[in-house]
């Protein structure tokens, strides 16, 4: 406000400080022109402040993003500064292209708004991850547990047929073995009942019937033991194969567990699940997205809503002047080149004519000398003379 009360003579000598010139640079203003525009000085300083805020926000957001990818914080900061510089360049290009004097500014403005919107949406993600960090890590633990279950379910499905076949084979062998053992057990019980008098003969001791049942029991027991020797290795083989499958599943589960992390994409997925499952978080999420988008769009919005001032008019006139001067200088350059070429042509033409005029007498003398030599020489044909004369005395056309 103090600048508006300065005398006119002092306004002409206004020199901005370094901070002001830096803000003008951020707003892509021309300081030589803007220094003489009292009202527009603060306007473009405001635009520069919005660009500075967006630049700082982009640098912080990208630094946090890279901190989830790299292990060393210094590398993350350097990468964040680099990407922040790229965002700064894009923002300066966007606001530089916004001009009210541009009659075809609608489509470029839509394109710039779309570009800023895309950048803003992406830049909002790291900031939201930082703000909801604790809730996101809780959701990540739930998501990782679900991933383990899904992985285990897929493994069970993959090995289901093989395990089922081995289990059925084991059950069949075990059933056959149990059936033989039941026969042996029944024969042993019958033999014992005959010996203690509770059997069919009601005789105590090792009598004829008891001896027959003893022989039957012993025969069945021997058959059972022989069968057991044949079937137990097959049952153990089935058990070992099933155990190997379970070990392979567990090994894959352990390897899969090492791949589970809290990287950027994992956090984004957890944030999406958190938003889908929690209404209060969803409301604050979308509210923060809007706020962060406005931060990214601030330079474009500010440059669009600020009224056109004397700077824009002077800039338009200066640009028209430079175009006019460039056109005039180009025309003068063409005229000078044409004059040079015409003068050179005239002088070269006179020089060539003078050259041939002075060489005419010498060529005639040389012709007479050659003709005289030819007359005195009998062994030279006329065609040879003509070739020599053409090569030595006739002019050749310029290419």
Image (tube, rainbow, N blue to C red):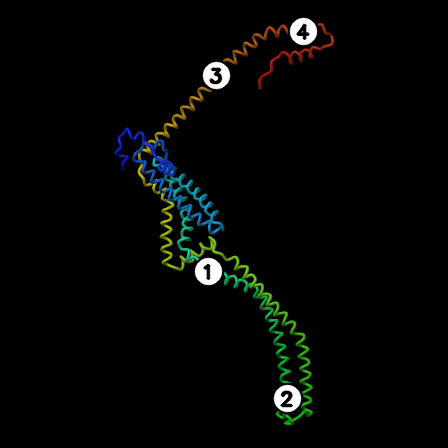
Q: Which mark is residue 141?
A: 1
Image mark for residue 192: 2
| Residue under label 3 | 342
User: Do the residues bearing badges 1 and 2 touch, measured as CB atoms within 8 Å?
Assistant: no
Query: Real-space Cα distance between discs 1 and 2?
Result: 64 Å
Mark nearer the N terminus (4 vs 1): 1
Label 3 vs label 1: CA separation?
86 Å
Residue 271: image quadrant is bottom left
Badge 3 or badge 1: first in the primary sequence: 1
Instruction: State the quadrant of the N terminus.
Output: top left
Which of the marked residues, 3 or 2, is nearer the chain's N terminus?
2
Disc 3 or disc 1, which is closer to the eye? 1
Residue 234 drawn at (x, y percent): 65, 71
What element does badge 4 sit on?
Answer: helix
User: On screen, 340 above or below 252?
Assistant: above
| Mark 1 burial class by Cα count in 10 Å: few <14, some 14-19, many 20+ | some
Q: Position of residue 96 (x, y in %)?
A: 38, 37
Mark nearest the camera among 4 and 3 is: 3
Residue identified by numbered label 4: 371
Question: Do tag 3 and tag 2 residues touch (Cβ < 8 Å)?
Answer: no
Spatial CA span between label 4 and label 3: 42 Å
**Quick one: label 4 or label 3, which is nearer the N terminus?**
3
């Amino acid at each position: 406000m103090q600048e508006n009360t300065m005398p006119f003579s002092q306004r002409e000598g206004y020199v901005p400080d370094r901070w002001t010139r830096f803000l003008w640079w951020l707003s892509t203003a021309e300081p030589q022109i803007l220094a003489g525009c009292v009202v527009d000085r603060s306007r473009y300083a405001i635009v520069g402040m919005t660009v500075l805020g967006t630049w700082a926000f982009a640098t912080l957001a990208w630094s946090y993003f890279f901190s989830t990818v790299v292990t060393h914080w210094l590398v993350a900061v350097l990468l964040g500064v680099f990407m922040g510089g790229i965002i700064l360049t894009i923002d300066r290009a966007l606001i530089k292209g916004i001009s009210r004097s541009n009659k075809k500014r609608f489509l470029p403005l839509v394109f710039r708004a779309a570009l800023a919107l895309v950048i803003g949406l992406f830049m909002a993600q790291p900031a939201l991850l930082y703000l909801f960090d604790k809730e996101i890590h809780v959701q990540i633990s739930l998501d990782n547990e679900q991933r383990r279950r899904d992985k285990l379910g897929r493994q069970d499905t993959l090995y289901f047929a093989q395990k089922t076949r081995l289990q059925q084979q084991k059950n069949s062998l075990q059933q056959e073995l149990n059936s033989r053992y039941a026969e042996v057990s029944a024969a042993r019980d019958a033999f014992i009942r005959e010996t203690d008098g509770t059997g069919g003969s009601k005789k105590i001791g090792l009598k004829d019937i008891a001896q027959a049942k003893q022989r039957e029991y012993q025969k069945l027991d021997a058959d059972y033991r022989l069968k057991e020797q044949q079937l137990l290795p097959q049952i153990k083989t089935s058990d070992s194969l099933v155990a190997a499958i379970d070990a392979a599943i567990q090994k894959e589960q352990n390897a899969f567990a090492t791949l589970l992390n809290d990287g950027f994409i994992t956090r984004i997925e957890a944030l999406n699940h958190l938003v889908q499952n929690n209404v209060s978080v969803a409301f604050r999420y979308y509210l923060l997205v809007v706020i962060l988008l406005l931060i990214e769009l601030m330079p474009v919005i500010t440059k669009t809503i600020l009224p056109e001032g004397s700077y824009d008019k002077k800039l338009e006139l200066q640009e028209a002047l430079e175009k006019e001067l460039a056109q005039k200088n180009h025309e003068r350059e063409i005229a000078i080149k044409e004059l040079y070429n015409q003068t050179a042509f005239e002088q070269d033409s006179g020089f060539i004519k003078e050259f041939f005029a002075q060489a005419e007498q010498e060529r005639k003398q040389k012709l007479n000398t050659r003709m005289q030599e030819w007359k005195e020489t009998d062994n030279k044909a006329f065609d040879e003379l003509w070739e020599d004369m053409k090569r030595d005395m006739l002019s050749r056309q310029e290419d």
